[in-house]
Image (cartoon, rainbow, N blue to C red):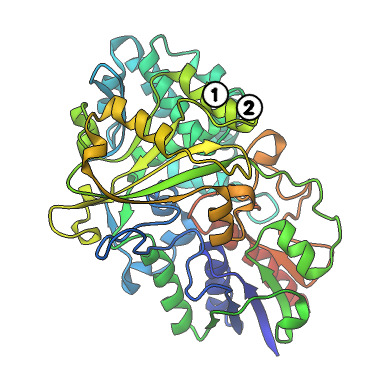
Amino acid sequence: MLDAVVVGAGPNGLTVAVELARRGFSVAVFEARDTVGGGARTEELTLPGFRHDPCAAAHPLGVNSPAFRALPLERYGLEWLHPELPMAHPFTDGSAAVLSRSVAETAASFGPRDAGAYRRLVEPFLPKWDTLVRDFMSLPSTALPRDPVTLARFGLTGLPPSTWLTSRFRDERAKTLFAGLVGHVMAPLSGFATGAIGLVFALAAHARGWPVARGGSQSISDALAAYLKDLGGEIHTDYEVKRLDDLPPARAYVFDTSPTALAKIAGFGDYYANYRYGPGVFKVDYALDGPVPWTAKEARTAGTVQIGADSTEINTALRAASRENRAPDRPFMITVQPSVVDPTRAPAGKQVFWAYGHVPSGWTGDLTDALERQLERFAPGFRDRVLARATAGPPELAARNANYVGGDIGSGAVSGLQILLRPKLSLSPYGTPHPAVFICSSSTPPGPGVHGMSGHNAAKAVWRRLRQA
């Protein structure tokens, strides 16, 4: 009998398997797709030689993840590549605010009236970042805070809505960039704890950047899988699990799935009936005949580029998708251009480009024209560079990854108390009604992102069970 069976070979499923195998437990992973990866895959979606990331592409949380940093993933081929600028936010006048590794450079891009306010916001936390990020991405039930004073201070700053936090800025440049940071989790700017979301992304950039993985996000998953195999773990692909009886006998079962799928497989009825999924996204992967023709020079060297004219436009787009059940006319966009730092992703002289906007859950329309009209505002002539595009709305995203219910790439709404308490109000969020069944997906704390911390935290609950059994 195996000690543990893991269902789903995304970053969290692979991380929980690695953590258990490192402690001497026998582990097998079962994945429905023909390769491992989940939200961290790389595929030729458009033309031969153009390697795209169907979901996550830039990894501020991955490079800062306490779980990943504790594993020898570089030994298994993972290499982080850092663009000249982690992120840029261009404006229609051809200028840009930037999120740089340097706090001073970032503050200067906001203008003299807000430079000091930004420095006062982030500088107190940076010297204690490694401890803070570990505390923030863990739970009292899995690890007591190492620095409760700094964590409490962070909470006082970040738990109010982001609009409260950005009220300390006087000009639109800083407010707009920060609004875009919050928009990465598809949360309206007035929501609970949205200030913390924006602050974490900013601090992550200053601490270690927003890199891409050489060769694509698949490199992260492949490194985890290779390490797991060296530890004696097994991985079975093309293996769809519809009920617990489909799995071999084990002392514990861990699911890197949505709560909805887990309830169906394990027969938990309506146990997760109150879990809320968020808005979806409409994503386009481009094969380009050269760089994006950004008007703002800063955007040309940034790995990630946020698109939104000002904070009002961004908030209008977020509200349209999440609260008004309509696709925005001018979508807020997150774009990633891996080719600015990784020439292996496309043929010589060509580039891959990744972009998405927010839409209502399950939306079946086509946002391509609206996205490209937005891009043309900040990069005139963009359409002339397009060699091919691969589009995916909520139905296609959900078909590609069952955890993206309704096209929600966060695997659950990041709003209200569900920002912190997911998938249920519980001190043991990784446990389920069955003492031998656990959940470790992005539907559990600390939530969305390729960071493995949901798997890392869940592993602690699992090995406590295995030691007691």
Amino acid type of disc 1?
Answer: Ser
> Percent x, y for residue 405?
64, 52
- For label 2, the residue is 191
**How many residues crowd around disc 1 within 10 Å: few (fewer than 14), some, or many (20 or more)?**
many
- Residue 435 visible from this viewpoint: yes
Q: Residue at x 24, y 64 (%)?
A: 49
Q: Quadrant of the N terminus?
A: bottom right
Is 351 drawn above or below residue 16 in the view shown?
Answer: above
User: 461 or 197: which is nearer to us?
Assistant: 197
- Residue 45, quarter of the rendered image: bottom left
Report the side of 131 relative to 118 (left or right): right
- For label 1, the residue is 162
User: 386 or 99: which is nearer to us?
Assistant: 386
Is 74 drawn above or below residue 273 in the view shown?
Answer: below
Is 385 drawn above or below residue 48 in the view shown?
Answer: above
Amino acid type of disc 2?
Answer: Gly
The numbered dot on residue 122 is none
Cα separation between marks 1 and 2: 7 Å
Residue extending furthest toward the left: 349
Q: Earlier in the sequence, mark 1 or mark 2?
A: 1
User: 344 or 157: which is nearer to us?
Assistant: 344
Contact (Cβ within 8 Å) of mark 1 with mark 2: yes
- Mark 1 residue element: helix
> Percent x, y for residue 222?
40, 71
